[in-house]
Amino acid sequence: MPSISREEVAHLAHLARLDLAPDELDHLAGQLDQILGAVAQVTEVAADDIPPTSHALPLTNVFRADEPRPCLTPESVLAAAPAAEDGRFRVPQILGEEQ
Amino acid sequence: MTVTTALPSFDEAIATYEPVMGMEVHVELGTATKMFCGCSTTFGGEPNSQVCPVCLGLPGSLPVVNEIAVESAIRIGLALNCSIAEWCRFARKNYFYPDMPKNFQTSQYDEPIAFDGYMDVVADGVEYRIGIERAHMEEDTGKSLHVGGATGRIHGASHSLLDYNRSGIPLIEIVTKPIEVPAEVAPAVARAYVTELRELIRALGVSEARMELGQLRCDANVSLRLPGAAYGTRTETKNVNSLRSVERAVTYEIRRQASVLSSGGTIVQETRHWHEDTGETTSGRVKEEAEDYRYFPEPDLVPIAPSREWVDELRATLPEPPSVRRARLQEAWGFTDLEMRDVVNAGALSLVFDTVAAGATAGGAKKWWLGEVARVANERGVALEDAGISVADVARVEVLIGEGALNDKLARQVVEGVLAGEGTPDEVVAARGLAVVSDDSALGAAVDDAIAAQPDVADKIRAGNLGAVGALIGAIMKATKGQADAKRARELILERLQS
């Protein structure tokens, strides 16, 4: 029994706006299953006395003062964009949304 | 999709169904910098001039939390009578849409910083307690401009343009528990809630909360059910960006859903968009389920664990609750409940307060802000504070009235002049020659003329009928083009006819 189904991979692909062909879905479903299996091994060594964590460092409350810092220039920002127009990032038509 | 069939009236809708509402309000904090980076939050900058690797989501950049934003979130939570989390984390909300260059929004999911509170609001003279589910921290998105379609809408656009100056500005999202109030007051309660929340946010000083600038944005969830039945399917109406719209959008959605349900249809769980111009909502996207956002704890930020000392310190900075402040001011100003409600609904409480502090009477301050200024602001589609007259100007007009230099009619012209950009009240008085005529020689001639022109009225006054004085004052006003000092004119009339 794989830990991720082909349908779930298809759903994830849709959420990620990826158009995957049937053979690509088969291929990636298998690979994702292997990755999940590898990660699942970690749970086997996690003992009851080890609390779950989402961070490698045992820190809390790392804050920054509310003081402005220099920004990038629009020119340098847009130089990295695949396309720009009127000082803005230009992106392809957005589908499936009506605002 | 626009509903073309006639909708039932609101009264017809609630004769059958009970509405349940849930309000989600986003408040843009007035911090100097963004939530996770030091980019300025100043409004109106050149596009993409207030961005950096962090808010652009460039590889290798790391966010750091703005301390003032956390402080503001805790203060909002406390003011809403919430519990403050002893430990909470940020989470990534994953979605693919170009308004967030990171492809996720840093938000909070199952560990909001504030939860389980309430706020009391008054609608139609009755107090309702609105439960607060949570208040959590997140970041704003960039601004999209849709090109090539009709009137800037996404539909039919050939492409879109993105400005990320707003992306990463701190937001606090405040979510209510289901609001179940008598159906007939539901839209008014929704409006009262947003109004009260706006006052609270302003009193806290964490944001100016100006809806027309998008600093306070409201999404209204509405569902209908038969009395006693389980909750119905809800819709989430977005883009409800004025207090009046809150009430109208809720009313419309109740009517629309009643229409669908009573004709045997089912409500689709979806996002709907409110259109101020047509007063309708239209279908947006079918809402993604929470699991589709694949929330997970943000690995680049460490947890937030506010100490009890810090929370107590912040609790000590809370302002007087707006309802308490209103009651105190209402008494000091001598306003009726209705007058006070008008001031609050107009968003003029602080303006009236400041104008009184600058030397005006409360009644005078209210009269101008809710009268002439509101009329012009409404015409121009701007907020009262942007209509073109300052608190000091309104106070000055009131002082001039108090000194007898202006009467009501002239003061109206002065305010008009200031609103038209002609300068300060004193400049308008000088330029338009609007000073009240109270010097006895000029006024005396007008009084004599009026008496001569209406001998029968003069006789009545001589006989002791003081009610007739008004007729002469009216004539004097007309002759002096409204510039006569009415009080002095009355004195002069009585001197002449009663000696």
Image (cartoon, coloured by chain):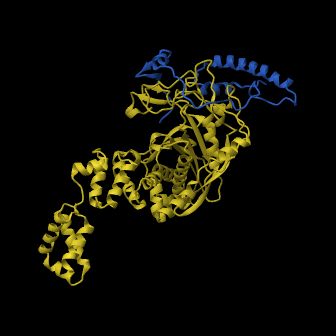
Chain colours: A blue, B yellow
Can residue B295 be seen here? The reply is yes
Q: Quadrant of the C terminus of chain B?
A: bottom left
For this orientation, the residue located farthest to the bottom is B463
Choose between B300 and B350: the one closer to the eye. B350
- Who's the residue at 20% across and 82% down the image? B462
Indicate the position of residue B30 as horizontal and vertical percent values: 53, 38
- Who's the residue at 63% across and 23% down the image? B62
Choose between B173 and A66: the one closer to the eye. A66
Choose between B253 and B68: the one closer to the eye. B68
Q: B368 left or right of A43?
A: left
Quarter of the image where one finds residue B410: bottom left
Task: Give above or below for B482 relative to B458.
Answer: above
Indicate the position of residue B309 as horizontal and vertical percent values: 72, 42
Q: B448 left or right of B115?
A: left
Indicate the position of residue B58 as horizontal and vertical percent values: 58, 19
- Give the total of numbered labels: 0
Can residue B184 be seen here? The reply is no
- Who's the residue at 23% across and 63% down the image? B438
Quarter of the image where one finds residue B61: top right
Indicate the position of residue B379 as horizontal and vertical percent values: 33, 48
Q: B225 left or right of B110?
A: left
